[in-house]
Amino acid sequence: KAGVTQTPRYLIKTRGQQVTLSCSPISGHRSVSWYQQTPGQGLQFLFEYFSETQRNKGNFPGRFSGRQFSNSRSEMNVSTLELGDSALYLCASRPQTGNVGYTFGSGTRLTVV
Amino acid sequence: AQSVTQLDSQVPVFEEAPVELRCNYSSSVSVYLFWYVQYPNQGLQLLLKYLSGSTLVKGINGFEAEFNKSQTSFHLRKPSVHISDTAEYFCAVRLNSGGSNYKLTFGKGTLLTVNP
């Protein structure tokens, strides 16, 4: 069974640009969450999607947005990139029912220069 | 709001020694508890979870954790570590309050370094 797939693995962008990251959840998982990991702030929750609807959102500016498609694949977008947006962005998926833990992807390492 | 404190940012140990990584949480409602491990340049892998029932939880790679409600702790232990256990370990909580809030709140992480 394939795991959570995130693309691309590495990305370098310039300040002011925008970026789109992609996440394909485990087959059958309909819930997808995104987290930002930085050395200073640690792991912080960005948002969660279920059946194409955003259910929860973390405390991030409106430059951070996301969406989920009918096949449960999700994308997150960051506009007007700032140096502080440099981070590892992790996507996680979970099944619709049950309380099993989230399964995380390997992440996308974004560097803003 | 819930919070998680991992009391040690770094724990160095020798191979085959026992280890305990400490985690305390704060929440006004009951929670589910998780431990994740992160190897360099990788995502998070679930080690174990506490949902309900027995307070001693066994996970993968020989790790176990004990939930202590009165002390609001969920410490991770392994009786004998290997070099390959060198990684960063994260404790996380999720509210057990029903509804649709599945957000995980993480601690800052503990870097476990196993020396030969």
Image (tube, coloured by chain):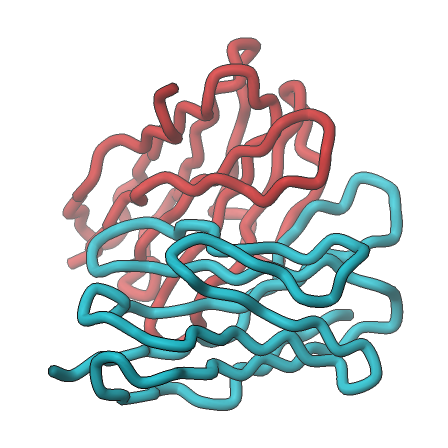
Chain colours: A red, B cyan
Residue most extreme to the left = B116
Residue at the (40%, 50%) spot, across then down: B45
- For the C terminus of chain B, the image quarter is bottom left
Whether A2 is drawn above or below B82: the answer is above
| A71 relative position to B80: left or right | right
Whether B65 is drawn above or below A108: the answer is below
Where does the image place residue A70, in percent across and percent down from the top left?
Answer: 56, 10
Residue most extreme to the top = A70
| B85 relative position to B102: left or right | left
Total numbered circles? 0
* Closest to the observer, B28 or B71: B71
Residue at the (67%, 33%) spot, across then down: A54
Whether B33 is drawn above or below B42: the answer is below
Where does the image place residue A27, in percent across and percent down from the top left?
Answer: 48, 16
Residue A58, picture quadrant:
bottom right
Residue at the (63%, 20%) spot, across then down: A52
| B94 relative position to A22: left or right | right
Residue at the (27%, 63%) spot, across then down: A83
Residue B26, picture quadrant:
bottom right
Where does the image place residue A44, in percent across and percent down from the top left?
Answer: 51, 61
Where does the image place residue B11, in percent across and percent down from the top left?
Answer: 34, 87
* Closest to the observer, A72 or B19: B19
- For the N terminus of chain B, the image quarter is bottom right
